Image (cartoon, rainbow, N blue to C red):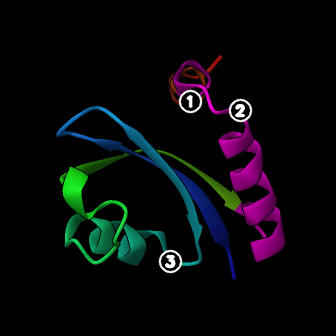
Amino acid sequence: MAYFVYILKSLKDGSFYVGSTGNLKDRFERHNQGRSKYTKAKRPWKLVYSEQFPDRSSAVRRENQIKARKRKSFIEALINGP
């Protein structure tokens, strides 16, 4: 089963959310339906980036790498590519 690291951008305030999941389509819908406590207030969300991994541990490791950078400029550079 494939796992994904994804980045959402709030269309309300421009903030980003980084997460990981085994079902990207379902997780994205849950965020926009308000079924995620943290992202509920900043709806609607747009999926702006994703990476696929062969297992959950690889995806979580990458998610934590992205979150550890803690800079909006890093996330924007990742989204916009090299």
Task: Say whether marks 2 and 1 touch (CB < 8 Å).
Answer: yes
| Among numbered discs 2 and 3, the one appearing first in the sequence | 3
Depth check, mark 2 against mark 3: the one in front is 2
Q: Which residue is mark 1?
A: 75
> Measuring 52% from the left and 30% from the top, which residue is drawn there?
79
Query: Alpha carbon of mark 3 to alpha carbon of mark 1: how far?
Result: 22 Å
Q: Nearer the viewer, residue 23 or 15?
A: 15
Amino acid type of the residue tagged 3 in the rendering:
Asn
> Measuring 37% from the left and 63% from the top, which residue is drawn there?
38
Q: Which residue is mark 3?
A: 23
**The residue tagged with tag 1: helix, strand or loop?**
helix
Q: Nearer the viewer, residue 7 or 14?
A: 14
Amino acid type of the residue tagged 2 in the rendering:
Arg
Numbered tag placed on residue 69 in the rendering = 2
Query: Alpha carbon of mark 2 to alpha carbon of mark 3: how far?
Result: 25 Å
Numbered tag placed on residue 5 in the rendering = none
